[in-house]
Image: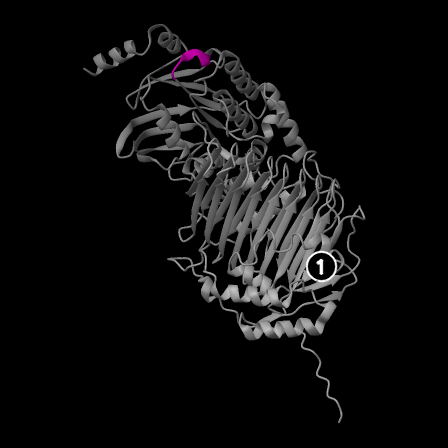
Amino acid sequence: MSLEISGLRVAVEEKEILKGIDLDVRPGKVHALMGPNGSGKSTLAFAMSGHPNYKVLDGSVRLDGEELIGLAPDKRAKAGLFLSFQYPAAIPGVSVANFIRSARMALRPDDLPPAKFRKMIFDQLDVLDMDPAFLSRYVNDGFSGGEKKRLEMLQLAMLQPKYAVLDETDSGLDVDALQSVGRSINALRATEAGADAAFLIITHYPRILSYIPADVVHIMMDGRIVKTGGPELANLIEREGYDKIRDEVASSVA
Amino acid sequence: MPSITVPPPTAIAFVPTPGTLEAALAFLDRAGAGSGSAVAAADRRAAFAAYGVLPVAGGFPGRSWRYDYAKLPFDALQWSSGRRSVPTMPFAAPAAADLDADRPALATENAGGLVHLGATLLEGPGPTSTDPRVIVTSLADALRDHAELLTPVLHQIVDPHADRFAALTTAFQNCGAFVYVPDDVVVEAPIQLLFVNGEAQAAAVFPHVAIVLGAGARATVIERHAGEGDAFVCGIVEAHVGAGASLDVVSIQQADPEARIFASRGARCERDATMRWHLAELGGGLARSVVTTALTGEGAAGEASALFFTGATQHVDLTVHTDHRVGQTTSNTVVRSAATDRGQGRFFGNIAIRKQAHGSDASLRDDALLLSKAAHIDSVPALEIAANDVKAFHGATVGSVDDEQLFYARSRGITRPDALRMIALGFFEPVVSRFPGERLRDEIRTALDAKIDAATEID
């Protein structure tokens, strides 16, 4: 049981961005994937989710043994993968409630009667400090950056995936919003359904990790994972930035 | 000598020729007061003469547009005019209480209405108005009983010689309705005008609807076109909205896929009057609708919300024209359209702001969604501004479903067909949400959903 990425090479518009990624995320664990801008972190997220613009050249992504590469994005979601988007699309005319209900029905048909769904979504709104009026707004339409991220977290909580990839969920969030996000994820992990959920948190800055402590930290540079360690690695980045690791990697290659 | 009585024909074969017009006039003469005629013979002849010479606007065949309006086939159509008693009126069940407080509510009952089967007026125990001063009757009866109310507006708002189709309606008018709401009377429940066609007879139907709202009055009129068979329906709707009055006209067109359906709709808005058109063109093989709103009094407001969805080989041709004749008038036009399979659509939006119409504010927004490769929608918005110191906006888009929206929905487990359906239905929502009453909005959402179900290709 794990989300196992091996030898993953991905190109965007003929340019190879990911040059062989190996990563193994076990149930219940929190992995942080850190790296400077342009290192390929978001590319990994999109490639795993099956975005048509990201072409897999080689390698595999197996979710509890099931190969995801080649599957449609909705099939990957059904397998148990969730991506929290850095820039989620707006879907005008489709209410948040309708969207989440449709997604939940698609992933787990008939498991939640409407009344229970309603209670669950209101509880989650509370955790995320969101007004119930949010539910009748159109998906991401005219949302602020913080509202978009909160909606991603609301979906995460409502869809209860096995493996969640959070792409820069912390970017553009103020401290209050970041706290809400942390609270939401920790609340999810505290439930029976969420106890085995694993997270791959893609981030530029370590601050989100003070709300959701990582078990494993990976550093990505130029399409490769160059260093893997414990939470102390995030602290190192906090203190010294990426330059030191860059130099270290350069000298070890040389 | 024994006299031989020949029973009068119940219908005549319709083709737009002088011979048919004379046969129609003879038919109406025989039917007398029992017919639905509200146009004098001389006016019919004049209109028919105009029909012959008026230019054909719009409908020229193109690469995928099949119809030439100058060469529409009229085979096997039946023209008649009359009325028939029926034991019950086929109105929809009473509406649930409406949640909108600030809209003319579609409350728990209908405030009167008329049902036509083809051009035959069905008469029976229908819903009645809550206020006895409100008039809902056939146009022919109105001309006889309420001439002083009808004649100031009849043919005054939609020019019977405006184009070929308005002229054709006038020449062959065989049914219609008159709605009158006196000064300061508020009719909460909708007044329903139902035009249904039967499969048995391909009817040629020429309805003329006149609506008059007195000063400060408020009403909602729902006009529905439904039924089966390849009918030819060509009608006029004209509305006078008195000072400070507020009129909502809802038109839901769900005619048979074989039907051809034409409408010339017009409104005249006095000082501080509000006219709201809500149009849903969903059915018909060929549907053409022209909506003209004249803002003739300061403070008048015109709103047009229209949607159409063409599937199979359907053609829809929609024109929305707003004429700001005086200053301090506002208008707002929102159009959403989609096409699947080989569906064809065209939208002409036009806003005119006259020279003296200072301080006017107009906006026109039109968006089209193409859901298959062979589907096509043309969009032509236009502004003619002759005044200074006005606010005017227009914008139009034609496109297919956005890949990022699709990916986002699919990443949540929603299948591609379901995601397309969701995005397409959402696309219409800005127009659907402007229809009055949740029940009506849900009815339209359901109809749009059924259009998506019926499509063989959605992409």
Measuring 67% from the left and 59% from the top, which residue is drawn there? B176
Q: Secondary structure at mark 1?
A: helix
Question: Magenta stretch?
Answer: A204-209
Measuring 38% from the left and 39% from the top, which residue is drawn there? A70
Left or right: residue B86 versus residue B50 is: right
Residue B378, x across and y down, in percent: 42, 49
Magenta segment, principal secondary structure? helix
Residue A165, x across and y down, in percent: 44, 25
Residue A60, x across and y down, in percent: 35, 33
Measuring 50% from the left and 54% from the top, which residue is drawn there? B316
Which of the chains bears the disc numbered 1?
A: B
Q: Which residue is mark 1?
A: B143
Asked whether B286 or A128 is in front, the reply is B286
- Crowd tier of the residue under label 1, counting other residues whose Cα lies within 10 Å: few below 14, some 14–19, many 20 or above: some
Q: Of all residues shown, which one is farthest toward the top? A: A239
Asked whether B153 or A240 is in front, the reply is B153
Q: Amino acid at mark 1?
A: Leu
